[in-house]
Image (tube, rainbow, N blue to C red):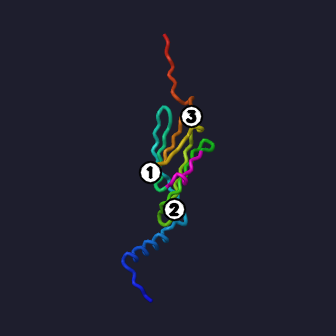
Amino acid sequence: MNEKCTDKEKCEMKQSEEKKEMKCHETIEILPLVDIIEDEHAMTMYFEIPGAKPENVSVEVANHILSIEAHSCLCRKGRQIVFRRCFQLGTSTDISKIHAKTNDGVLTVILPKSEDAKVHKIPISE
């Protein structure tokens, strides 16, 4: 018994097949773009990580090296995109107070300065 598919059914079948083919099996590593803004209190870093959910993002500091890794749900040429980047931190960063958040494909990492690194105004006497 041969049944003819409607145009809508054909389209749905084709989309389902395309989704199966689009699944990513390997990864491709990409260096995310970053903007760095520094003021007297902290350094703020903004990383572009489109398609990465907060549970797939890792921010770590070891031996004064900040490492970020974000697994995106996006693919390039059939390979899952993984964003990775590392930065050497100076001794002026208060590592215990670093915090991070994601919003709309942007990872924001705030690196507060230690008290010793902040500018202290010295009064001048006559």
| Label 1 sits on residue | 104
Give the foreground label among 2 and 3. 2
Report the front residue among 110 and 13: 13
Q: CA distance from mark 2 to mark 1?
A: 19 Å
Is 57 colored magenta in this rendering? Answer: yes
Quadrant in the rendering for residue 35: top left
Report the front residue among 125 and 41: 41
| Label 2 sits on residue | 80
Name the residue at 54% across, 41% down: 99
Compared to residue 13, the image places residue 64 above or below, namely above
Within 10 Å of the Cα at label 3, are there few (<14), some (14-19), or many (20+) other Cα atoms?
some
The residue sitting at the left extreme is: 7
Compared to residue 118, the image places residue 10 above or below, namely below
Q: Of marks 2 and 3, which one's residue comes earlier in the chain?
A: 2
Quadrant in the rendering for residue 90: top right
Give the foreground label among 2 and 1. 1
Where residue 38 appears, x then y in whole percent?
47, 37
Q: Secondary structure at mark 1?
A: loop
Q: Amino acid at mark 1?
A: Asp
Where residue 46 appears, x then y in whole percent?
47, 45
Mark 2–mark 3 contact, CB under 8 Å?
A: no
Where residue 108 appears, x then y in whole percent?
49, 45
Q: CA distance from mark 2 to mark 3?
A: 36 Å
The range drawn in magenta is: 52-60
Q: Secondary structure at mark 3?
A: loop
Report the front residue among 94 and 124: 94
The residue sitting at the top extreme is: 126
Within 10 Å of the Cα at label 1, are there few (<14), some (14-19), or many (20+) other Cα atoms?
few
Is 53 colored magenta in this rendering? Answer: yes
| Label 3 sits on residue | 92
Give the foreground label among 3 and 1. 1
Q: Amino acid at mark 2?
A: Gln
